[in-house]
Amino acid sequence: MNEVRQTTIYIGLNDSETKTQIHETDKYIEILKIVCQNYHVAFSVNMVNGGYFHDDGTYVEENTLVLTLLDVEKEVIQEIAQDLCAFFHQESVMVTSSLSEVYFVRETI
């Protein structure tokens, strides 16, 4: 088992100005995939629902993409988060980080 840094980036899909989701979720996922491929990082992505308070105090509920990355340098995480924030026209994205034990299981018949 290896201990590695697990980083999660939460990206809301509502536009920061209109506070509504402008495009279909699949379009956002495709953009996210392109970003991760361009940074040469392996990833997992899930869609969840969440709530967010904007800087102006407005509360919205929205679809949120949860991007999980393992063992990626902090500088690369920052660049990916900034790109997704800009591309998805977000006020901010949330980044969490923790240590995780990781191992791979391989088996053949």
Image (spheres, rainbow, N blue to C red):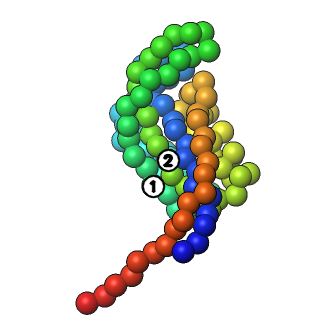
Does residue 53 sit above or below 95 in this rendering?
above
Q: Is residue 53 visible?
A: yes
Rendered location of residue 23, percent (x, y): 40, 30
Task: Report which quarter residue 105 is drawn in.
Answer: bottom left
Rendered location of residue 62, percent (x, y): 41, 25
Q: Decide which of 40, 52 is in the foreground and name it.
A: 52
Q: What's under tag 1, amino acid-wise?
A: Ser
Does residue 43 sit above or below 90 in this rendering?
below
Q: Residue at x 45, y 30 (%)?
A: 13
Q: Which residue is mark 1?
A: 44
Q: Which residue is mark 2?
A: 67
- The residue positioned farthest toward the left in the image shown: 109
- Find out whether the residues at labels 2 and 1 contact each other: C-beta distance under 8 Å: yes
Does residue 37 sit above or below 3 in this rendering?
above
Rendered location of residue 76, percent (x, y): 69, 53
Rendered location of residue 54, percent (x, y): 56, 16
Q: Residue at x 60, y 40 (%)?
A: 95
Q: Residue at x 50, y 57 (%)?
A: 43
